[in-house]
Every structure is written in C-alpha cells, then in structure tokens.
Amino acid sequence: MEIEVGRVIRSSTTRFTVGCRVLQPQVPVFGALVKARAGVEIYGLIYDVRMEDDPFLRQIATVDDLQPEYIEDQRHNRQVPIEVGVLVVGYRHNGEIYHWLPPQPPLSLDVIHTCGPEECVAFTRQFDYFRLVLESRDLPADELLAAHLRYAAQVRGKDKDSFLLDAGRELARLLAMDPIRLDALLGRIRP
Amino acid sequence: MSDDRLLDIWFHRPATPTGTAAARRLGIVVGGSLSEGLRVKLDQNTVVEGMAVGRYVVIHGQTGRRFFSIITDVALDAINPAIEKTPPDTSDRFITQVYQGITTFGRLKVTPMLVLDEGSQEPRPVKTVPAHFSAVYEASEEDVSRVFGAADEQHFYVGTPLDMDNVRVHLNLERFVQRSSGVFGKSGTGKTFLTRTLLAGIIKQGVAVNLVFDMHNEYGWESEGEHRYRVKGLRQLFPGQVSVMTLDPESSQRRGSKVDFIIRIGYDQIEPEDVELLAPLMGLTDVQVGALYFLRRRLGRAWIERLLAEGEAETEGPGELEQILDEGKLHGGTLGAIQRKLGMFRRFDFLQPHVSVDVVGKIMEYLDRGMHVILEFGRYGSTLEAYILVANYLTRRIHERYVQRKEAALGRKGEEPRPLVITIEEAHKFLDPAIARHTIFGTIARELRKYNVTLLIVDQRPSGIDEEVMSQIGTRVTALLDNEADIRAVFTGVSGAGELRQVLARLDTRQQALILGHAVPMPVVVQTRPYGPELYAEVGHEEGEDLQSKLERNVALLRGEQVEGFD
C-alpha cells in the first residue's frame, strides 16, 4: 500500500526535501523507503523529519493555559510545512532497479510516496546502495541504515533472519576495516 | 517449498548421481607460486575445521586444466588484522555468523602436484599454476582413482587416501624396487607392518627377490602385533616361496619358526672390511682400523682366530704377534685394544673358527631359484654389532656376485640376475655419514639399479643417514616423525616437498603414512591397509576356517549331498 508523503520542495542529485502538512502515524518515518514518481522512479531513504518554527508558533508557545484546540489547529494548519529529508539511493528505469544515483533529481512539487512491501523487497534484493548510505558522513548514516534494514526485514516475514544475515555480511565486507562501527551497526540490526 | 524438494527430504535422494558433479567447492586461489604453494581463500560456507593437511583438492584452471594438489597447511585469516585485538562478541550467534567467512575466513596452502589437460586422461607433472580466482574443489574419489590407477601386475594396493574409503592407492612395485626405498617412522608407528605389507606385495607380484635381515624376527614366521594379536609371517603367506634362515636356531625353534638353514660364518671368512663398519660401535680408532688390515696381511686368513687365541693364552712361545711388536710395526697398546675389542666375537655362537659350508653360495642358490630369504637373528637381534657384522658380511659378498653376474650378462645377453631387494633395519647404523661412503650399503644406495640390487631401508632416525644416500632413495614411505631433523632428512633431495613437512608432522601415530617418490605419481597420505585376513586372502593364502569349510563342502559333495562346487 502506497501512501503519499508530500511534494518535493528542494532537490539535488543526492538528496531532496519533501514538504508535508501533518504527521500521520505511519508517515513519514525515519528509515522508510520512498520514491518520487516522475519519469524514472527515484528511490530514497527518509533520513530526517524536521518541523521549523514560525513567528506565530513562537508566540503561542509562551501562552499560559494553552487550549488543546489551539494546539490541534496549530499542528494541522501549519504556516511552514514539515520538511522530510530524503537521501537518494537509486532509481528504476524501464523496470530495472539501479543502486546508484539517477541522471536527474526529482522536480519540485513531484509527489513522493512510500514504497509498498513488494517494492521494498524488490529494491533490497541487492545491497549495492549500502555504500551510498554509509558514505554520507554528515547524516546519522548508521542509524539510518539500521532503521531501514529492520523495516526491510520485517516486510519479509519468515525470511527475516536470513535477510538480516545477508545484509550483515555485506556490511561486514564494507566495514571490515572499521570493526567498532561494524559492531555497533550489527548490534542495531541483530534479529 | 516445491513438492519435489519435500519428497527429497523424505526419501533422501542423492543430490547428483555422478561423483564429479557432486564435488564440493571449497574456495578460490588468491595467490602463491609453484615453488611455495598456492594460497586459497575458503568460501564462506566452507568449514575450516573440515579441512585437513594431506587431503587432495582439484583446482579447475581457466584453460580447462585440472590441477591435482595436496593441502599442506590450514590457516585462519582476517581482512583486518585489528580483529585479533578487538574480537567481536561471540556469544551472539548472529554476530558470529556475520563475521564467519567474511571478515574472518579460513585459508589453505595447497601444493600443485599433477596437471590433467582438458580431454586427457594421463596426469603429468605440474609446471605452472592455475590463474587467480580459479575455483578449488574437493577431489572426488573418481579424480583420485584416476591418478593412482588400478591394481594390475605392477600395482599393489597399499591403502586409502584420507577420508576416501572407496579409493585405493596403488604403489607401482616395479618402480618401487628399481631404486632403493625407505620406510621411516618413529618407533611404534607401524613401520614393521608397513614393511611386511610391502614385502608381501613384492613377493606376490614377483618383481624382485627379497633378502631380509630380520633383526627382531618379525617377518618370517608368526609374530605378535602391538595389540597382542598374532600376525602371519611371510613364510606362512607364501609357502614354498619364502625361506627362513637363522643365526640362532634355539630361538627359532622356541618360536615355532621353521628354518631351512642355519647360518654359520668362519673366522677365516671375515675380512677387515667386514669389521671396519663396526668401528664406531666397537670403539675402534682409525689407527686400530688401519692395524686390522695390516694384521690380516701378516697373519693370513686365520687372522682373527690367531688374534683371539693369543689374547687368551699369552703363555705360549713368541708367536708372530710378538714378532710384529718387536719389529715396531705395531704399538703394543693398539694390538691389545684390538684383541680386547674383537673378543666380543667369542660371544657370537654363529661365528666359528672354520665353516665348511659356503653361506653366501647357499643364499645365492635360494635367490637364484626365486626364493625369498629371511634371515632371523634370534637373540642376536638385540646385539647391534652382530646384526651389522652379518648384514655387512653377507651383503658385500652377494653384491659382489651380482656385480660379476651383471657384467657377465652384459657380454652374453639373457643371464641377468634377478632384481634383489635387501631389507635392513636400523639403517642409520649402516648409513651413517661417517661410514656410508665406505660401506657396501652406501654403494648400493648410490649406484641405483645398475647391478639389480636395491635396498629397502627401515629406520626411525632418518637424520642419521648420510644425506647423499637419502637423496638417492627413490620411494619414501613415512609414518609419523616429529623430530625436526628427521623430517628434514626425509625430504632431502625431493624438490618442492618442503611444503609436505606439515603433513608429515601431523600424521596419526598409527596406520597412516605419507608415500612420496618414484613409485607414486604424487605424494599421498594413506590410511594403510591392515595386514590381516584381507591381505592374506589377496596374496592367495587361505585361513584355517576357509580350508575347513572347503573340506566340509567337498565331503558333502562326495557323499552326494551337494551337486556342484568341488574344489
């Protein structure tokens, strides 16, 4: 089941930002696989969900005895949207999935959807995109990858453990020279 | 899961019908050289504990060649050496599984031995190495069988490769007797059993006649194995083909060993050369050895008798010895020492002042008839001096006759003497570097088969054997050795076999041997075949029970109770 997350407000080849109005229980979540549907489907992982303030919000935050209705109203009718940061990890063209950067970024106001279980399984069949995540040093890359892998494992049902083992082995290969980082990461995805 | 798979689980269908296709992939070649062996990285799923030195692997090269190789070392390795300092939490199964085979993995060192070209059936010695990342497979039984051939006129089954009970390793006995061979191993590792098996093979195939200097009376008649069960001697297995001679008839009688001939040697038949080999044992100095030759010249054939006699009775009038001393040709102390040391001969009952029978001629007569001769030493087996004296005495003369015959045969074709294999135990005493150059055994080992005489040396300290002699040993059958020097000695003169040292040092203490050299296409670790009923049957010997049942069957037949099968 695909759920709309929001529309692109800023984008580049490696990352883009999605604006959305309200936090739904399932969307957007940290580590989820999302896609922009515009010609080629661009896949990304949600690495950040940010709520900026606005002048009215700052004022209202200081009000004593704040009514719940105000709070609800402020949350639903935001002046500035919630910003969702997405790290590009691949794309699909003519049905083929590629785990490297797309030729063009998504356009502004492209709609971003979450990926359903089947698509998630299809995308995580290979692990070539791990490097794109691990090398984004300014992001909480390890946390992001761990959250993503836990989610990808969950949608696999009974094949969960073998999936995590394979992913863990790929990580071990990539992070062989950094055993402490590897240990921490493996500790986060351990079934 | 498909229905087929389910059925397979229930009915356990073998994965693939043919042996070759089922060969398990172990890893890939990642480096190495022909001289130092190849390095193989094990695949993630290959269990390092399942590997063992001495086993065979087959490397499938890029050009369709298959390289038969032997595992010479098993090691652990890691991508990051720091993992040794910060090992992961191994209590967590997941973490262990992730690490296994990825950041940490097993490594093999394998030495290529033979190569089989694509489409060819004849393996050749290896002269190159497979390319990087060539896949390494466990050798299938079919592969190993192809290398070691089938049993035929020349090939004799000696054992099975490690973990391959259905494959038989055959020794090419014709090649085995072409050059001198050796059976080595620490005491208690089954040298005697191995030797007995080899001798049985030589007798059965008739590739040579044997002369065995049987120090501990283990080859001719029944003797007790290490586990206190009785094993049959060669004479029992090959009645009519093996003749037993003895130095100690009482001992043979006690053991129930049937003896054809009692060896007696006359003092007057012993030459200084026969005594010289004993010099280190008897403590004879170079001067004293020189004096032996002098005394032989002066005193004539009866030199030993006269030396011993004068040593006993000094009251007699001035004999020739006094005269020699007076002349100043010999120092009194030297003479005294020689007399004292030769006095040991008096304890050897097989030495007598005069013997009318030509012992050497007698043995030659047997050998000429194709009879194998086993010489039992009885109680003298524990006296090394007696063993060396007799072995040297006989071998020198037999070799001399072989040389004469061979040379005569070169003139008039067709009268070549039968190939002879002389088995000696405690060989390092004969082939010590200090004396090997002068002794007949050193000569025989060096001259190869020029005169149709070769040695089968049985020894537990190969490091004590002259290097030059060791390098001439064609086939080495080696049970466990753990002394570094001994291991080094076994590999003297074997090119590229240094890698096999690990293999040798890791053999089981029993019934395992490494065979390398002339008689096998490549070095092989074998689980040696038991010397027991199965071997008895193969060489044509029938056990008492078999004979009994045959008798009963024949009786039944004569009485008309049975129709077929008279034997």
Image (cartoon, coloured by chain):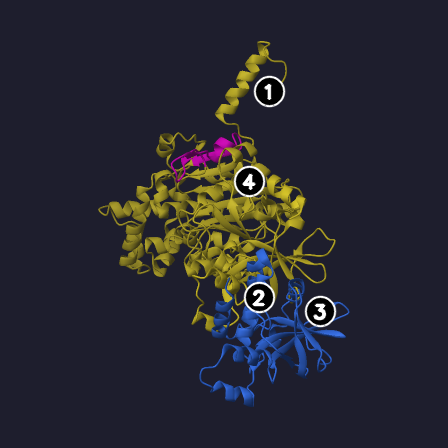
The residue where tag 1 is placed is B567
Chain holding disc 1? B
In percent of the image, x 51 and y 88: which residue is there?
Answer: A58
1 and 2 marks on the same chain: no
Tell me which label, 2 or 3, sits earlier in the chain.
3
* Nearer-the-camera pick, B301 or B421: B421
Instruction: Tell me what hue chain B is rendered in.
Output: yellow
Q: Secondary structure at mark 3?
A: strand
Picture quadrant of residue A40: bottom right
| Disc 1 from disc 3: Cα separation | 79 Å
Other residues around mark 4 within 10 Å, as few (<14) / some (14–19) / many (≥20):
many
Rendering coords of residue B45 (x, y %): 56, 58
Q: Which mark is residue B201?
A: 4
1 and 4 marks on the same chain: yes
| Disc 1 from disc 4: Cα separation | 26 Å
Is residue B229 located in the magenta-colored stretch of the structure? yes
Name the amino acid, label 4.
Answer: Gly
Q: Is residue A96 above or below residue B443?
A: below
Could you tell me if residue B417 is visible in this image?
no
Label 2–label 4 contact, CB within 8 A: no
In front: label 1 or label 2: 2
Q: Secondary structure at mark 1?
A: loop
| Disc 2 from disc 4: Cα separation | 70 Å
Chain holding disc 3? A
Name the amino acid, label 2.
Answer: Tyr
Q: Which chain is blue?
A: A
Other residues around mark 2 within 10 Å, as few (<14) / some (14–19) / many (≥20):
some
1 and 3 marks on the same chain: no
Label 1–label 2 contact, CB within 8 A: no
The residue where tag 3 is placed is A97
